[in-house]
Amino acid sequence: MDFSNMVLSIVERIPRGRVTTYKEIAIALGNKNLARVVGLALRRNPRLIEVPCHRVVYSDGRVGGYVLGVDRKKELLMSEGIGIENDRIVDFDRILVRADFLRD
């Protein structure tokens, strides 16, 4: 499996109503320094409907970018019951999915 498909496979494990970070995905892949490369892989996600990349946010809880626009990302997150204030995830630490959960 190539890197992009490994990233997408991990993102598919993020439960509805929860988020993870680019860094947590990189850690799950074995190298925390790959966070930017994870972002590039998500930007090229060919299966937006199936792979919930809107659930991936920055490590400081900021919503971050999205191929369909930040406003759409916020709408999707809020539709799952995730609160957003000042472009940050409310209760970020509580709903954050850590790398241990994301690993096989």
Image (cartoon, helix red, strand yellow):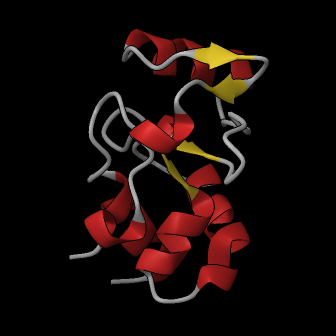
**Residue at (34%, 28%) from the top-left corner?**
17
Query: Residue 69: where, in percent of width, then height?
Result: 71, 25
Residue 1, compared with residue 62, is above or below; it is: below
Q: Quadrant of residue 87?
A: top right
Q: Position of residue 33 (x, y in %)?
A: 69, 83
For this view, does 25 lie left or right of residue 85? left
Q: Which residue is drawn at 73% across and 39% down?
A: 64
Q: Residue at x 36, y 17 (%)?
A: 80
Q: In this view, does 43 lie to the left or right of 75?
A: right
Q: In this view, does 94 lie to the left or right of 45?
A: left
Q: Nearer the viewer, residue 13 or 88?
A: 88
Q: Please tell me whether residue 6 is drawn above or below residue 29 in the rendered image.
A: above
Q: Can residue 7 be seen in this view?
A: yes
Image quarter of the N terminus: bottom left
Give the x, y percent position of residue 81: 39, 14
Q: Is residue 85 above or below residue 3?
A: above
Number of marks in the rendered image: 0
**Residue 19 visible in the picture:** no
Q: Which residue lies furthest to the bottom in this view?
A: 30
